[in-house]
Image (spheres, grey):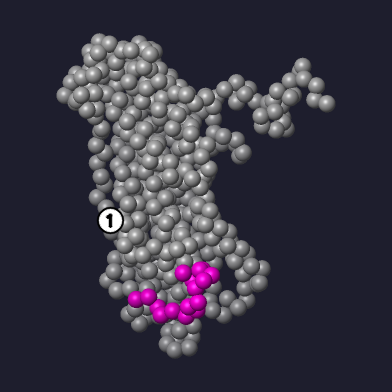
């Protein structure tokens, strides 16, 4: 499942203090107003309960799309390129200084990540576009959450949700790829790990891995079977095995292997980045394991449909190893202690509650859910093989060494640089009106209380009670 990105917040600035234009004097004012709206929207989104944040993503997306064309207009003015067919003469008064809160860097547990002071318009552009990509990933996450609700969607609703999520992933991938390519021109890496070239490259690979993995979700019936099996109102204790065509099962396996390759590249890039959030690193590793486990499961389905049940069991045991779970045989399953079964049942119920609440679900990239599917098929096929076919189960290591190569499904989208409309460029030729500048209404989170920490052990927000002139009793 998509990684639950945290949208960053930023400080208040006025572009009029840093830029001036003789051809379009209102451009810094208009850019400041658009940025003030983005700043307020991000702060309000941060205060919304996690279960309600998905419904506010459209507001954040609209504010970012309104602001980004002004950023590229400023960038065009500094680089000497045209914008909407017009040349913008922009003069740098002094170097731009801005603060963004890093959400992908490491932070002290229980504390909010610190703001990072950045210089240059390039850093502002990178953080803003990265935030837009995070919004697309969160929208894809909201679409996929509907597939695991209590009321299962019909095939049309399922296909619509998956198609929308796939489009959001590709949009996010286009932004990360554009930023990663642009970051290669830097002579030194920025202070924030969020916009370093290695992190941006890893996020580009991650979004492509997620977009590739969900291509098999539309035609994969087993996740819905497992969800229905957990449904308390379901009275069908026995169901007929779901048939998957042999060719499509092999194709799905190759698509999953391509997703695993992208995740492995992202994992290697994050290994080169310093001070990256451990949750993101773990998620990328879980996604790689999930994709590899799905590939093994589909290859097992391909073998079982051809009558090679023993080989299919070997593939499922290999899938459990790839997922990081212990693979045991039918005889060893009886020796598993009751405490282990109790722990597994508790984990399943905890994951189900996360899905119901819509908070923290899928943080393992679907690894636990895939493990449920493998366990269900393994139990069924081992029983069939022990009672009817009695085939030799080959070692899983031998099967894993013979896995086919991955197959790409998506062609990467190109990020189209948004440009201001012609009438907006024309309006900015007029002299600026200082009274129309809007820098934001929300209070700055980096206020005096946050900059100066309170006494050790003090409850947050009670710093004034511990001052020298205050009597505690």
Count the marks: 1
**Disc 1 on helix, strand or loop?**
loop
Question: Nearest the camera: 81 or 471?
Answer: 471
Residue 23 left/right relative to 324? left
User: Do we see residue 400 in this rendering?
Assistant: no
Residue at point 59%, 66% (across, down):
345
Q: Is residue 434 visible?
A: yes
In the displayed structure image, the side of residue 262 where residue 193 appears, left or right: right
> In the picture shown, does residue 411 fall above or below 257?
above
Q: Quadrant of residue 310?
A: bottom left
> Magenta residues, as a range?
228-243
Answer left or right for 28 relative to 284. Answer: left
Q: Which residue is mark 1?
A: 408
Q: Position of residue 417 (x, y in %)?
A: 25, 33
Quadrant of residue 112 in the image? top right
Residue 179, horizontal then vertical, whole percent = 33, 35
- The residue depicted at 51 percent of the width and 39 percent of the height is 48
User: Residue 95, image x and y in percent?
Assistant: 39, 15
Q: Is residue 234 magenta?
A: yes
The dominant secondary structure in magenta is loop
Which residue of the protein is positioned furthest toward the front in this rendering?
Answer: 435
Q: Residue reaching furthest bottom?
A: 388
Q: Quadrant of the C terminus?
A: top right
The residue furthest left is: 85
The residue shown at (24%, 29%) is 419
**Looking at this view, is 394 or 39 the one in front?**
39
Magenta run includes residue 245:
no
Q: Position of residue 140 (x, y in %)?
A: 38, 49
Between 281 and 349, the one lying in front of the other is 349
Looking at the picture, does residue 168 appear above or below residue 308? above
Q: Residues within 10 Å of mark 1 (few under 14, many from 20)?
A: some
């Amino acid at each position: 499942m998509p990684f639950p990105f945290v949208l960053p917040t930023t400080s208040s600035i006025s572009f009029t203090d840093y830029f001036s234009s003789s051809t379009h004097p209102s451009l810094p004012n208009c850019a400041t107003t658009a940025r003030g709206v983005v700043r307020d929207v991000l702060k309000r989104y941060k205060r919304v309960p996690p279960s309600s944040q998905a419904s506010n993503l459209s507001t954040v997306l609209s504010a970012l799309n309104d602001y980004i064309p002004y950023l590229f207009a400023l960038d065009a003015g500094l680089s000497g390129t045209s914008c909407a067919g017009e040349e913008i003469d922009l003069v740098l008064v002094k170097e731009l200084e801005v603060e963004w809160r890093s959400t992908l860097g490491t932070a002290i547990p229980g504390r909010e990540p610190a703001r990072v002071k950045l210089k240059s318009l390039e850093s502002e552009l990178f953080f803003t576009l990265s935030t837009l990509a995070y919004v697309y990933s969160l929208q894809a996450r909201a679409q996929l959450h509907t597939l695991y609700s209590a009321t299962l969607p019909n095939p049309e609703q399922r296909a619509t949700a998956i198609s929308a999520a796939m489009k959001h992933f590709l949009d996010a991938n286009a932004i990360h790829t554009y930023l990663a390519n642009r970051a290669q021109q830097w002579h030194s890496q920025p202070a924030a790990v969020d916009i370093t070239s290695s992190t941006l490259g890893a996020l580009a690979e991650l979004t492509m891995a997620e977009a590739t993995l969900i291509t098999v979700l539309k035609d994969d019936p087993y996740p819905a079977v497992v969800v229905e099996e957990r449904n308390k109102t379901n009275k069908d204790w026995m169901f007929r095995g779901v048939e998957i065509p042999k060719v499509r099962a092999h194709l799905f396996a190759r698509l999953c292997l391509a997703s695993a390759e992208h995740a492995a590249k992202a994992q290697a890039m994050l290994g080169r980045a310093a001070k990256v959030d451990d949750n993101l690193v773990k998620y990328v590793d879980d996604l790689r394991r999930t994709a590899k486990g799905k590939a093994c499961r589909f290859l097992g389905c391909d073998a079982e449909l051809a009558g090679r049940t023993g080989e299919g069991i070997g593939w499922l045991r290999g899938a459990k190893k790839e997922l990081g779970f212990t693979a045991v045989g039918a005889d060893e399953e009886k020796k598993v202690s009751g405490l282990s079964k109790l722990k597994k049942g508790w984990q399943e119920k905890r994951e189900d509650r996360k899905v119901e609440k819509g908070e923290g679900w899928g943080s393992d990239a679907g690894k636990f859910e895939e493990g449920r599917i493998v366990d269900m098929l393994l139990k069924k096929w081992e029983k069939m093989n022990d009672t009817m076919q009695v085939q030799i189960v080959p070692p899983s290591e031998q099967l894993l060494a013979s896995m086919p190569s991955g197959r790409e499904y998506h062609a990467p989208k190109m990020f189209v640089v948004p440009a201001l409309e012609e009438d907006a460029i024309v309006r900015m030729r007029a002299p600026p009106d200082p009274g129309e500048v809007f820098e934001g209404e929300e209070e700055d989170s980096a206020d005096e209380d946050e900059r100066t920490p309170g006494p050790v052990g003090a409850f947050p927000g009670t710093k004034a009670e511990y001052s020298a002139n205050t009597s505690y009793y």
